């Protein structure tokens, strides 16, 4: 613990529910300790990726590892995240970690954290702020590269199928509009679409990164467009929903089906879907940011500098691989 008297901290933590609408979880503080207090403003629980990310933080920032974690689930609402950050400032935490729902609209609350002298670490998605000194650093996936990798995979796949000169009709299930993962994946895949004159993007619509919304949007795509060749789902859970919609409409998908399914994240259930022959490919996005953020905090504690932007290296997994063997080596 940093500045405040233990007793004041106890009082403030007890009040935290008032500041953040009661959504925060925190272990009851001991009377005095040397724990580093970290407030994590999480997006929500919209996907398997997010669940793995939450688990990664909860299993890393434990008392045994020297931390007290105050965890806030914003239910995919930016206003809830802003409230959570304000409550972290009130509680005088040592570090604030944010996985921002969307990129814009953060300047005021980040300024409040800066004025309070609390470092803000961004994890997963980015913020678009005019003054980069408002946050310490960011760690996450390279979303534009992920989108480009998906497009390059499709070029190769169609070549192997002898379909390079065919007209290819594509629909995209986008993530939460304005989220880095949506912006980057849409842009990256779009960069490759521009190079392929015979690819036709029929429609793009958000499925909010959830399975239910992915299914709903896919149902309407199938009604509007009878000849879809490819679905790009900007995360695995929307792809699972799309696959359900395709099957319910009496169509088939995957390597032996009518519709090619391209997805992102590569969570365990995506491996199962590829093994079952439903999904063609999932571009990895690694959610295990807990230890990465802990390493950053440890460096800052020692007064060391940290890289401002830290990309995680990621791979592409498709049905040409020995997927059961690969799945057995993975942690999420
Ligand atoms: O792809 C999706 C989650 O921001 C990278 O958010 C993350 C995305 C991930 O809901 O499944």
Image (tube, rainbow, N blue to C red):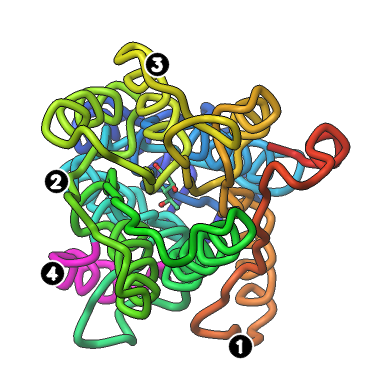
What is the distance, in whole Å, between disc 3 and disc 2 at their CAs? 37 Å
Residue named by callout 3: 247
Which of the two discs, 4 and 2, labels the residue nearer the N terminus? Answer: 2
Residue 69 horizontal/vertical position (percent): 53, 42
- In the rendered image, residue 33, in percent from the top left (x then y), is placed at 64, 45
Report the quarter where the N terminus lies. Answer: bottom right
256 left or right of 199 in image: right
Instruction: Name the residue rendered at 27%, 51% in the picture.
Output: 101
Left or right of 219 on screen, residue 254: right
Measure the alpha-carbon separation of dots 4 and 3. 47 Å
For label 3, the crowd category at 10 Å Cα-Cα, with few meaning under 14, some 14 to 19 and many 20 or more, is: few
Where residue 120 appears, as percent x and y from the top left, is 40, 68
Disc 1 CB within 8 Å of nearest ligand 1 atom: no
275 sits left or right of 14 in the view? right
Identity of the residue drawn at 47% across and 41% down: 260
- Above or below 167: residue 79: above
Name which of mark 4 and mark 3 comes first in the sequence: 4
Q: Which residue is mark 4?
A: 108
Q: Which mark is residue 305?
A: 1
Between disc 1 and disc 4, whose residue precedes? 4
């Amino acid at each position: 613990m940093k500045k405040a008297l233990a007793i004041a901290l106890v009082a403030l933590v007890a009040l935290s529910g008032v500041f953040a609408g009661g959504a925060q979880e925190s272990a009851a503080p001991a009377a005095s300790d040397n724990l580093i207090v970290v407030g994590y403003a999480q997006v929500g629980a919209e996907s398997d990726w997010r669940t793995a990310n939450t688990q990664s933080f909860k299993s890393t920032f434990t008392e045994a590892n020297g931390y007290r974690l105050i965890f806030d689930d914003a239910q995919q609402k930016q206003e809830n995240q802003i409230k959570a950050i304000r409550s972290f400032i009130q509680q005088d935490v040592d570090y604030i970690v944010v996985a921002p729902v969307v990129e814009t609209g953060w300047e005021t609350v980040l300024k409040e954290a800066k004025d309070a002298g609390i470092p803000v670490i961004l994890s997963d998605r980015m913020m678009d702020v005019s003054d980069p000194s408002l946050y310490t650093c960011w760690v996450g996936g390279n979303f534009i590269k992920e989108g480009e990798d998906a497009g390059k995979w499709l070029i190769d796949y169609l070549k192997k199928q002898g379909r390079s000169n065919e007209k290819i009709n594509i629909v995209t299930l986008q993530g939460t509009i304005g989220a880095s993962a949506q912006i980057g994946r849409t842009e990256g895949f779009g960069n490759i679409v521009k190079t392929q004159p015979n690819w036709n993007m029929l429609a793009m619509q958000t499925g909010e990164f959830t399975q239910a919304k992915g299914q709903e949007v896919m149902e309407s795509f199938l009604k509007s467009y009878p000849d879809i060749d490819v679905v790009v789902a900007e995360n695995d859970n929307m792809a699972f929903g799309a696959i359900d919609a395709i099957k319910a409409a009496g169509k088939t998908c995957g390597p032996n089906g009518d519709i090619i399914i391209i997805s992102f994240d590569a969570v365990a259930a995506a491996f199962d879907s590829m093994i079952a022959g439903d999904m063609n490919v999932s571009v990895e996005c690694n959610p295990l940011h807990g230890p990465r953020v802990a390493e950053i905090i440890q460096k800052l504690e020692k007064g060391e500098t940290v890289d401002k932007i830290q990309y995680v290296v990621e791979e592409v997994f498709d049905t040409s691989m020995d997927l059961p063997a690969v799945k057995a080596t993975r942690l999420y």
